[in-house]
Image (tube, rainbow, N blue to C red):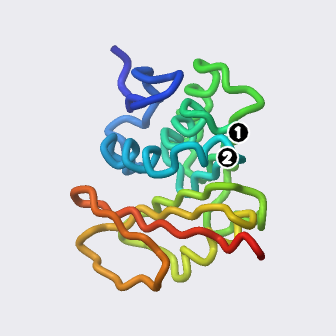
Amino acid sequence: MKPGIRITGGRFRGRKVHAPPGLEPTRPTPGIVREALFSILGQQLQLGGFCDLYAGTGCVAIEAISRGAPRATAVENHKMAIECMRKSAQELSLEGDFEIAGVDAAKFHRPGIFHIVFADPPFGAIPENLMERCLDLCRPGGWAVLQWPSDRPRTWPEPIQVRRYGSSILVIARKDPAT
């Protein structure tokens, strides 16, 4: 069996994506958190593009496609992780549905394009105003979701939702449909 991270649902359920040896420099989103994420998003996945900031292996973006997103962009700047994503995309025949943006997520800027933006930054270096940046990438009525470390509590303004899954928290916000 090839090393990697298993897709938890959709048309690629059970398939694996490639990962760098030892999973470094990535910190893959745990399966339970991915399952919760996609359960929360439900049919929203089918309504537009998905962006995975700090994508690492690209597993979340690939799983978004697996579960019905029409297309996904994985933003990552680590060369070994990008190569793993390319191998996974080729094996799963994702040409046209899956884009790899090989840039630093902090410099990625495509305002108002995506229906869903997911960000899972290195927990030791979470950028200021990350939620606002994610919402800026969303089109009106879109969703921004952060994976946040549960050992770094923070108060979030209403109507942001917070859900805990072990050592991770999903922080969920919707962009005002009128903007």
For residue 71, above or below residue 144 = above
Q: Is residue 54 left or right of residue 122?
A: right
Which quarter of the rendered picture does the N terminus lie within? Answer: top left
Q: Image point 53% across, 22% down: which residue?
A: 11
Location of residue 144 by image quarter: bottom right
- Which residue, given by chain and number where applicable, does mark 1 sit on? 71
Instruction: Decide which of 139, 168 is in the foreground and name it.
Output: 139
Q: Secondary structure at mark 2?
A: strand
Q: Image point 23% across, 72% down: which residue?
A: 151
Label 2 CA crowd tier, 10 Å (few <14, some 14–19, many 20+): many
Q: How many marks?
A: 2
Which quarter of the rendered picture does the C terminus lie within? Answer: bottom right
Instruction: Decide which of 87, 156 is in the foreground and name it.
Output: 156
Location of residue 90 by image quarter: top right
- Where residue 54 is drawn, which disc sits there? none
User: Nearer the viewer's eye, disc 2 or disc 1?
Assistant: 1
Q: Secondary structure at mark 1?
A: loop
Asked whether the residues under the numbered discs 2 and 1 touch, taking CB atoms below 8 Å apart as contact, a structural biologist would say yes
x and y percent of residue 84 in the render?
A: 53, 33
Location of residue 31 by image quarter: top left
- Where residue 73 is drawn, which disc sits there? 2
Q: Amino acid at mark 2?
A: Thr
x and y percent of residue 143 in the render?
A: 60, 62
x and y percent of residue 47 in the render?
A: 69, 46
Q: CA distance from mark 2 to mark 1?
A: 7 Å
Q: Image point 72% across, 33% down: which residue?
A: 97
Q: Image point 50% across, 62% down: which residue?
A: 145
Label 1 CA crowd tier, 10 Å (few <14, some 14–19, many 20+): many
For residue 56, above or below residue 112 = above
x and y percent of residue 138 in the render?
A: 69, 64
Q: Amino acid at mark 1?
A: Arg
